[in-house]
Image (spheres, helix red, strand yellow):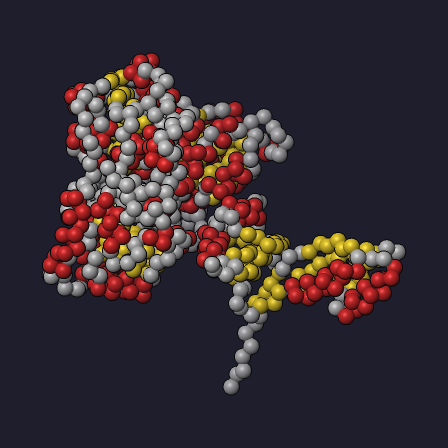
């Protein structure tokens, strides 16, 4: 059986009505999996960027990339998998904890260098930005302490600039 | 016969600096259509498009009124396949639009250039659940090459220009343009739009030279090559190049259903169609070859059978204009993205310089093997006294039309027998719903083909089930005096499903008996066409002669053997060598 891989794909699309529906419909219509998705305008108002994580084996991933390129609205497709890139995601986590765990929540927030953006006698709302690993780690530590409610943006990514040593 | 396909060439005129003129949306619609070279529109009016129809008589455009919107799309499809032009449809909003979906899906699967214009409620009513409103753009997103909603008259001209450009370029396909009603009455300052240029849309026509060289090397070394053509050969107008290649390297040739006519069916190198109902020798040749040169085909599951059993000993060269078709089901050794006519020409240039003098000798044993397959398992059917065999009807139609007719088909056994027993020798001669397999396609497609080719004989090969799906189009044929000939292979069953129930469901015929059918002769006459019937084999030829001589639409009701099956058959899940034979 081929290995299922996670691919981060960045798609530059024409900013036209329905373009997100086209991309999402492509995935659902062909049984491809979208794990997360983020979309917003770029500096060119005619172009938007969709960043999504898809899951599938190598052959499926190749089909996904080709099918995306085939869409008329799609200008460029970049598959970040295996390349050097910066990946970030933001999450807002509302943690409702019993009084004895509230101090521990603050310690964890301090260690992870995130922010508390809302507070009440019963809960804290934490804003965390980082790569997937950091967010997962934070959630793992907060989970045993109380009830969590979470809203995530999904991953965005940018290629790293090539570093060179000039002779 | 020159390739009929009108290919998109770069337009080199200077940018037209015309002065804008005041026009209504309806006028803009027709001005751009005329500029695109549209001569015929297949359509059905309604409230949302009444303004367009009102403006139509001012323009030199022919309108063919069908009796169902689905038929309008199939007719535009048949028109396109036989003329090489882009088919055009015009229908109203709501149910008019939804009725086009099946036709659009069929054109999408078979990559046929069409532009379908649907009416839409006025722009301020969109999203309001208005009368006859549907989100047809949403509904057809997965089955069109692209689609548009036009809410402002200022966008109309550019969108129509883009629609035609997209429909016929790269891998062709259907484009839907949804037009809000208020756009037609609104006025704008109209300038004929410049040729379409679309960021992010850049099909590759020129193949990679390195890949072509590698392909040529493989071809030189191959001992048991097979050339395998698909619908792309027809769409690119590449049948001459394909034939040249096969002749030069003395390779036997097979095609898919969609590729029939791309290589002469009477040529000594012809293997017959391959796939689920392909000939024995075609399937065996592909299974035993050491090099498969695939041109304009997409390795559909009806063709490959079990993927791991497909061409197990072969290196594969795959030429296709659509990168998504390459290595989708079958991994290939040499993928070449490009227009197949262009690619074949380059390949022929590369191969021309080589020494082919001993090629006939080198191919001797391969061709002898193939001949053995042909001799031991030819396409055949059992004869029975007093019973008309459906294959016999097709053979007679082939004989009496001298293989020169346009044949449209419905779907099922009728379609397969037509593909097997009519030996197509020219492209744009077989018009069939291959990818979608849509019953009810044949009669309206025949109407479209007859409009495109008034001087050719057009025959629809139908089953008694399929013909009833769009039987109302007999009225269209009569209204415009399109002398299409409908040959119904009437066995009182939904034949192909019955065959599967016989072979795989222990003859449990559930919901496939349709012996309760109208008297097709009386039905034809009720529509004002000619109706003829044959019940015995000796009646077939005289009936056909009579029908072909009449300059009127004719329905021929052939009462054929009820339980005849299509052979060979590759069972579902089997590989090409696992054919069930007669």
- Vertical order, B516 against B116 (above or below): above
Image quadrant assignment for residue B262 = top left
Q: Nearer the viewer, residue B217 or B94?
A: B217
Q: Nearer the viewer, residue A5 or B247?
A: A5
Task: Determine if residue B357 is in view.
Answer: yes
Which quadrant: the C terminus of chain B?
top left
Q: Looking at the image, which residue is at 16% across and 52% down?
A: B369
Q: Looking at the image, which residue is at 49% across and 47% down?
A: A30
Task: Determine if residue B10 is in view.
Answer: no
Q: Nearer the viewer, residue B335 or B89?
A: B335
Measured as percent of width and height from the top left, residue B171 is found at 38, 48
Measured as percent of width and height from the top left, residue A144 is found at 77, 60
Q: Is residue B492 left or right of residue A127?
A: left
Outermost residue, front direction?
B506
Q: Looking at the image, which residue is at 49% across and 31% down?
A: B97
Image quadrant assignment for residue B245 = bottom left
- Count of residue discs: 0
Q: Is residue B356 left or right of residue B456?
A: left
Which quadrant: the N terminus of chain B?
top left
Outermost residue, bottom direction?
A167
Measured as percent of width and height from the top left, residue B346 is found at 26, 59
Measured as percent of width and height from the top left, residue B221 is found at 21, 64
Image quadrant assignment for residue B160 = top left
């Amino acid at each position: 059986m081929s290995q299922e891989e996670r691919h981060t794909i960045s798609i530059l699309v024409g900013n036209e009505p329905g373009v997100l529906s086209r991309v999402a419909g492509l995935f659902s219509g062909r049984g491809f999996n979208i794990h997360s998705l983020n979309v917003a305008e770029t500096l060119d108002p005619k172009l938007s960027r969709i960043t999504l994580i898809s899951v599938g084996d190598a052959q499926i991933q190749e089909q996904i990339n080709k099918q995306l390129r085939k869409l008329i609205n799609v200008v460029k497709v970049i598959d970040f998998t295996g390349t050097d890139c910066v990946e970030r995601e933001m999450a807002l986590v509302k943690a409702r904890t019993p009084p004895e765990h509230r101090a521990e929540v603050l310690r964890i927030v301090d260690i992870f260098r995130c922010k508390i953006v809302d507070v009440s006698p019963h809960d804290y709302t934490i804003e965390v930005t980082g790569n997937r690993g950091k967010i997962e780690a934070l959630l793992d530590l907060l989970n045993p302490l109380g009830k969590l409610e979470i809203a995530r943006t999904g991953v965005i990514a940018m290629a790293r600039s090539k570093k060179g040593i000039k002779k | 016969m020159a390739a009929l396909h009108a290919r998109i060439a770069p337009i080199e005129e200077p940018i037209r600096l015309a002065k804008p003129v005041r026009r209504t949306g309806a006028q803009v619609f027709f001005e751009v259509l005329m500029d695109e070279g549209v001569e015929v529109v297949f359509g059905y009016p309604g409230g949302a498009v009444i303004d367009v129809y009102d403006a139509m008589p001012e323009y030199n455009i022919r309108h063919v009124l069908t009796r169902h919107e689905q038929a309008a799309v199939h007719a535009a499809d048949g028109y396109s396949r036989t003329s090489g032009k882009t088919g055009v449809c015009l229908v109203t909003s709501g149910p008019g639009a939804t009725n086009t979906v099946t036709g659009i899906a069929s054109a999408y699967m078979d990559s046929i250039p069409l532009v379908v214009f649907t009416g839409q409620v006025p722009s301020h009513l969109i999203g309001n659940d208005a009368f006859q409103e549907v989100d047809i753009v949403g509904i057809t997103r997965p089955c069109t090459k692209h689609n548009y909603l036009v809410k402002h008259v200022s966008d109309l001209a550019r969108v129509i220009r883009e629609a035609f450009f997209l429909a016929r370029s790269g891998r062709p396909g259907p484009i839907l343009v949804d037009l809000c009603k208020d756009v037609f009455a609104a006025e704008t300052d109209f300038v004929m739009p410049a040729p379409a240029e679309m960021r992010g849309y850049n099909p590759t026509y020129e193949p990679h030279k390195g890949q072509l060289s590698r392909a040529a090397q493989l071809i030189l070394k191959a001992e048991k090559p097979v050339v395998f053509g698909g619908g792309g050969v027809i769409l690119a107008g590449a049948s001459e190049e394909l034939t040249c290649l096969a002749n030069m390297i003395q390779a036997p040739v097979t095609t898919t259903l969609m590729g029939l006519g791309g290589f002469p069916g009477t040529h000594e190198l012809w293997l017959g169609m391959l796939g689920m109902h392909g000939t024995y020798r075609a399937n065996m040749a592909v299974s035993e070859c050491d090099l498969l040169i695939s041109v304009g085909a997409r390795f559909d599951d009806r063709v490959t059978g079990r993927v791991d059993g497909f061409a197990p000993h072969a290196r594969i060269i795959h030429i296709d204009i659509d990168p998504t078709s390459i290595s989708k089901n079958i991994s290939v050794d040499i993928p070449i993205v490009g227009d197949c006519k262009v690619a074949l020409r380059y390949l022929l240039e590369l191969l021309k310089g080589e020494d082919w003098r001993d090629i006939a000798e080198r191919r001797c044993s391969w061709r002898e093997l193939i001949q053995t397959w042909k001799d031991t398992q030819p396409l055949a059917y059992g004869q029975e006294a007093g019973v008309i065999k459906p294959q016999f009807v097709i053979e007679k139609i082939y004989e009496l039309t001298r293989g020169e007719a346009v044949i449209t088909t419905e779907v099922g056994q009728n379609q397969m027998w037509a593909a097997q027993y009519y030996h197509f020798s020219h492209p744009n001669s077989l018009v069939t719903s291959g990818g979608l397999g849509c019953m009810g396609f044949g009669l309206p497609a025949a109407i479209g083909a007859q409009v495109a080719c008034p001087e050719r004989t057009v025959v629809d090969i139908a089953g008694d089930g399929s013909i009833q799906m769009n039987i109302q189009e007999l009225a269209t044929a009569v209204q415009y005096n399109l002398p299409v000939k409908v040959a119904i292979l009437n066995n009182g069953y939904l034949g192909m499903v019955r065959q599967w129930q016989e072979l795989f469901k222990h003859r449990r015929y559930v919901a496939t008996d349709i012996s309760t059918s109208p008297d097709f002769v009386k039905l034809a006459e009720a529509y004002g066409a000619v109706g003829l019937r044959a019940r015995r084999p000796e009646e077939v030829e005289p009936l056909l002669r009579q029908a072909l001589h009449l300059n009127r639409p004719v329905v021929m009701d052939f009462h054929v053997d009820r339980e005849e099956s299509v052979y060979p058959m590759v069972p579902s899940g089997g590989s090409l060598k696992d054919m069930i034979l007669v």
